Image (spheres, coloured by chain):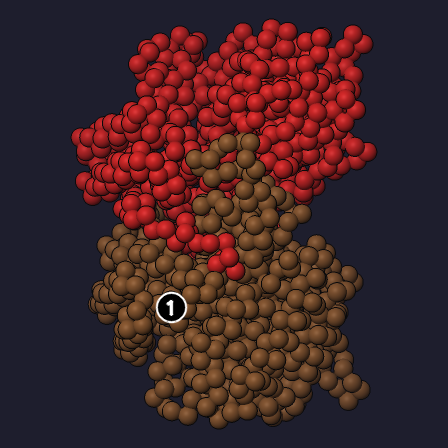
Chain colours: A red, B brown
Amino acid sequence: MANPLVADAFIDFLLFEVLDVEGLCRYPFFAEHSKATFEPWLAACRRVAREVLWPTYRPMDLEPPRFEHGRVVVHPAMKSCWRELVDLGVLSASRPADVGGQQLPLTVASLSHAYLMAGNLSAYGYAGLTTGAAHLIEAFGDPQTRAAFLAPLYEGRWTGTMALTEPQAGSSLADVTSTASPTAQGHFLLRGSKIFISGGDHDLTENVVHLVLARIDGAPAGTRGISLFAVPKLRPSATGLVANDVLVSGVIHKIGWKGLPSVALSFGDEGDCHGWLVGPAHGGLKCMFQMMNEARIMVGVNASATASVAFHEALAYARERKQGRPPGSADASTPPVPLVAHADVRRMLLRQKAIVEGSLALLGLTARFSDVAEHSPDDAARAHAKLLLDLLTPIAKTFPAEKGFEANALALQVHGGYGYSSEYLPEAWLRDQKLNSIHEGTTTIQGLDLLGRKIVAGGGAALLALQQEVTDGLARAGQRGVDAQLLEPVAKALEALVRTTAALGARGVSGDVTGMLAHSADFLELASTVVLGWVWLRLAEASHDRGDDFSRGLQQSARYWLLTEVTRAEHFAQLCESAESSFVDVKDAWLG
Amino acid sequence: MANPLVADAFIDFLLFEVLDVEGLCRYPFFAEHSKATFEPWLAACRRVAREVLWPTYRPMDLEPPRFEHGRVVVHPAMKSCWRELVDLGVLSASRPADVGGQQLPLTVASLSHAYLMAGNLSAYGYAGLTTGAAHLIEAFGDPQTRAAFLAPLYEGRWTGTMALTEPQAGSSLADVTSTASPTAQGHFLLRGSKIFISGGDHDLTENVVHLVLARIDGAPAGTRGISLFAVPKLRPSATGLVANDVLVSGVIHKIGWKGLPSVALSFGDEGDCHGWLVGPAHGGLKCMFQMMNEARIMVGVNASATASVAFHEALAYARERKQGRPPGSADASTPPVPLVAHADVRRMLLRQKAIVEGSLALLGLTARFSDVAEHSPDDAARAHAKLLLDLLTPIAKTFPAEKGFEANALALQVHGGYGYSSEYLPEAWLRDQKLNSIHEGTTTIQGLDLLGRKIVAGGGAALLALQQEVTDGLARAGQRGVDAQLLEPVAKALEALVRTTAALGARGVSGDVTGMLAHSADFLELASTVVLGWVWLRLAEASHDRGDDFSRGLQQSARYWLLTEVTRAEHFAQLCESAESSFVDVKDAWLG
C-alpha cells in the first residue's frame, strides 16, 4: 500500500471534531467557507501531495541543486511540482481575496499543507517561503512596493526568501551589519552578506524577492536599528527586469531538505543593489516578528509531517517484515511473525504515532488561536487567543522538532539494518528533521523566548489563560467519562507548571535574570509536557466511547502519552526549582 | 587546536586511578605488564589515532567503497591505515603471547582503542572484526583450522568477518537457513546467503575469512541446530590460494561507517564453497555467544568514541564562535561573546561530556570485570565478575549507543546552521553513531536480554552482586566526603531497581512472561540509570577534593548526571510496575 503521508481519518477528526473549523466560518473573514469548501480543498492537497510531490522526493534527495556559472540549478522534477503547487493555490491559501487568496483559516491551511510537506518537504519549502515573503510585503509594504512585488509572488511567477542571517551574527540578529543607503529615487542601496538563505537562488522562476534585514545609514546599534527591505534578484525597470547586483557566493551542502537550495548571498558588491523599505525605518525586526508565529507554526508542521511520513513507512514495514517469534514461543518450527507482533516494536510504533498525532493536534490548536486572534470580531476573544498563540508558539515549534527527531530515529530503528541504508527512506527523513530544531530560532532560543517573555506576558495573564484552558479541558474530559487515571497526570503537571513559573518569575523579579533563565530548556520541557497533556485530553475526550478502530487507536496513544510522558512533569519542575547549577557554574577551562 | 579525539587526562585518570589497571598485573596472565608498559602503548595508540587515522576520516566518509567487477574497492587511504594498525599490534593486543599477542588487559585495550575508533571508526572496524573472527578460531578451532587461519589473521595479512545475518532472518538467528554438507575430506560444503557483512570484501589484503553460521544437513530446527564455520574467500590448496565460491552479491549503501564496506554474500552458488567447522557441531551459537560480551563491549566503545570526538569538536567550536550576548546584557555595542558563554550551550556541552565520560567509565568497569572473570586465579572472584560482566554488557552496549546518539545530535546543534551542513563533521558522526543501536543486537534485544536473562541470572545472584557493588560504592563515596545530596538519588534508584526486578520476576515466575517482559525497554532505562549512578559515584569519589580544572570538570559532570538523570529512576520503575499496557494491548488495526 502506498504511504498515506498523513492519516486522513486523523486530520478529518482533528479539523471537524476537535478544532471545529466549521465554527470559524461564523467570522466574517471565513464566511464564504464551510465544510463543503474545506473538503475539496483537502482532497486537492492530498492528491497533489501523493501523486505529484511524493514521487519526486527521493530523486530530489539524491540529486541536490548544483551551483553552475554563478547560478543555482535545481532538480528538473521541481518544475512540475512548482506548477502544481501554484495551480493548487497553496501560495495564498490563507490570504485575503483582495490579493487573490482563498481566505482559508490558518488551521485548515496548516493541516492540509502537512500532506504537501510529508510528500516532499523541500518542494513545499519554496511555497512556504514565498508566502512568508509576500505576506510581509502585503502587511507592511507601501502601495508602490506592493504593486511591484505582491502579484508576481502570490501568483508563483516569482518566489520569495527570508534573508536574515549573516555569517558573523548567526542567531544574533542584533549584530546584523548589512547596510542600506537612501537615495533620492526612493529606493535604498543595499550592501552586505547573508547566509543560509533557503531558496536563495534557483532556475524555477524568473525572479526571486529577498526580504532582507539591514541597517539604514546612521541607524542605532542593536535590534532597534534594523530595517526590512524587499530586494529582488532582478529589479523592474523601464526596459523590463534587470540584474540587481545580488550575487550567489556559494551553496551550502545541507544534509537534508536536499531539493531546496540554501545559499550564501552577496548584496551590492558593485554598489548597485536596489532595495525597497518594507515597514517603518528601524522597525524591521518588529515587522519580522509579527510574522514569526506563523513561520514557527510552519516549522512545527514541517516537523510533524516529516515524523508522520516516516511513521507510516515504519508501520507498513513492521506489518510486512517477518522476523522471530514473541518471547515464550521460541519454537523455530513455527513460522516467524511480523515485526508488529513484538511488543517492543509496537511500543516504538505507538510512540511515533503519539508524537505525530500530538504534534499535529498541537499545531492545529495553535493555528486556531491564530485564526481567532486575527479574525474574531470579539476584542476580548482576540486578545485571549493572542496570548495563547504567543505562549504556545515556541512549544508548537519545538516539540514536533525535538520529539519528531526521536520519532524519525525510531522509524529507522524499526527498519533495522535496512533502515541504516539509503536504499530505504527513513534515514532521509531523519536528516530532513534535524533542521527543525535549528532554523526559525533554535531550541535554546525557543526556551528563552517561552520563559523570558511568553509565559510571563501580560503580567501573568498568559499563564492564567493556559491554566484556564487546561482546567476547562480537565473538567470536560471528566464529564465526558475519560478515565480519571488519565486526568490526574495533567492536573499534577499543571500544578507543577504554575508553581515553577511563580518560583522562576520571582527570581526574575528579584533581578536574578540568569537564575530565572538557567533552566529554560527544562522549563520548555515542563511547559510542553503540560500542553501536550492538555492536547491529549482533548483528543481522548473527542474520541471517547466511539468503539471504531481509529478511535481505539487514538485512545491507546492518549493512554501511552498521558501515563508515560505527562507523568514526567514533576521531574522537570524539580530541575527548574532546585536551581541545579552544574552547567551554569561550570567554567570553560573545566570542560576539557 | 587539533581535536584530541578522546581526553588523555580522563583516560589516564580512569585507567590508573579509578580502574586500578596496575592491580590487574598481579594476575599471572598480566604479570609482564605494569604502568611502564601501558603508557607507551597508550602513547602509540594516540599517535596512530591522531596522526594516521584522523586525517583519513573525512576522505573515507566522502568516498565510500565501490563495487567493481564483483569485487569491492575501498578508499586508497585505507592501505596505510591498515599497515599502521597492524604494526601497532592492535589485532592481538589482548590475546595471549602464544598467538603473537601482547596479553594486555581488555580494560587497557578497550580504552586505548577508543582513540582509534574516534579517529576513524571504519578503519578501526576492519581490525575489530579481524580480531573477533581470529579469537573465535583461537578459542574453538581444531589444530588444523587454527594452523590454517590464525597467523594470517592476527598478523593482518588477511582480515576476518562475522557472517551471521541472513536476509530473511534478520536478528532472528534461529531462522538461519544456510547449509553445510559434510565431505569425506573433513571440510564442509557451504551454501547460503548472508547480508550486512561488514568488511565482507575489499582490496586491502589478499584474503578474507568469514565466520559463518550454518546448519549441518539434518540438524534440528532453531538455535540448537546451528554450527560455526571458517569460510575463506580464497582457500588454501596445494597450489596456493584458490577461489572458494564466495560471491559478493551487492554492497549496502550505508549511511555511515562509510570507510568500511557492508556487503551481501552468496556462499556456494557453484557448490564449491569449503568451510571448516569451528567448535562442536550444532554448538555454533554457543561459541558465538561466548564472544558476545566482548563484541558488545566493542560496540559500546565505538559509540563512546563517536560521541567523544564530536563533543571535542563542539567544545572547540563553542569556544571559537562568537555569537550574541548573555540574557540581561543585550547591549549590541558590546562585543559578542563565544557560544560557551551562554548557559544553555554549556548545558549541551556538559551533557555531552557527561555522556562521553560516563560511557567510557562504564565500558572500562565492564571490561575490567571481563579481565577478572577471565584471568583471576580466584574461583569466587571469577564467578562474581562473570555475573557482573554478563549483567553490565547489555547496558554497556546500549547506553553509549542511545545516549551517544543524543550527544552527537547536540554536537550538531551547538554548530547551529553550520552543523546542518556536510562542510562540518558533526553530521557525519551522527550518521556513524546510529548503527550502534542496531548491530550486535538491537536495543530491543538488549532490553530483553537484560530483563529476561541477565538480571535474573543465578537465581538472583546477578542482581545481588550489582546491589552489593552499588551499596559499597555509596559507602565509599560517603566516607570520602562526596556530597550526600549526590548519594541520595543513587540509593533511591537502587531501591527502585531491586523492588521492580522482584515485581517483574514474580510475574515471570507466575508464568506471565509477556507481562514480565513488556516494559523491557523501560527496565533497561531503569537499570542503566542505576548503573550510571554507580559509575558517577566512582568518578566523583576518585576526583573528589583535588581542586585542579580536570577534577572540577568531572565533579560538575557528576553533579549534572546524578541530579538530572539518576533522579529519573523512579519514573522508569513506575512504568515497569504499573504495567501500563497501551502498546502491549494495541491491535495492529488500531495503529492506522
Seen in the picture, residue A40 relative to B411 is either above or below; the reply is above
Find numbered disc 1 in the image and state the secondary structure of the residue it sits on: loop
Residue named by callout 1: B544
| Nearest the eye: B539 or B580 | B539
On the image, the x and y values in percent for residue A59 come to 67, 40
Q: Is residue A77 left or right of residue A133?
A: right
Q: Residue at x 25, y 41 (%)?
A: A496
Q: Quadrant of residue A192?
A: top right
Q: Chain of mark 1?
A: B
Q: Quadrant of residue B73?
A: bottom right
The answer to whether residue B133 is seen in the rendering is: no
| Nearest the eye: A28 or B494 | B494
| Nearest the eye: B144 or B396 | B396
On the image, the x and y values in percent for residue A64 come to 69, 40
Q: Is residue B20 left or right of residue A144?
A: left
Q: Which amino acid type is marked by label 1?
A: His
Query: How dense is the environment of label 1, judged by Cα within 10 Å: few (below 14), some, or many (20 and up)?
Result: some
Q: Quadrant of residue A366?
A: top left
Seen in the picture, residue A103 relative to B204 is either above or below; the reply is above
Q: Residue at x 53, y 13 (%)?
A: A139
* Numbered marks: total: 1
Q: Is residue B230 left or right of residue A75?
A: left
Q: Residue at x 28, y 51 (%)?
A: B581
Q: Is residue B230 left or right of residue B222?
A: right
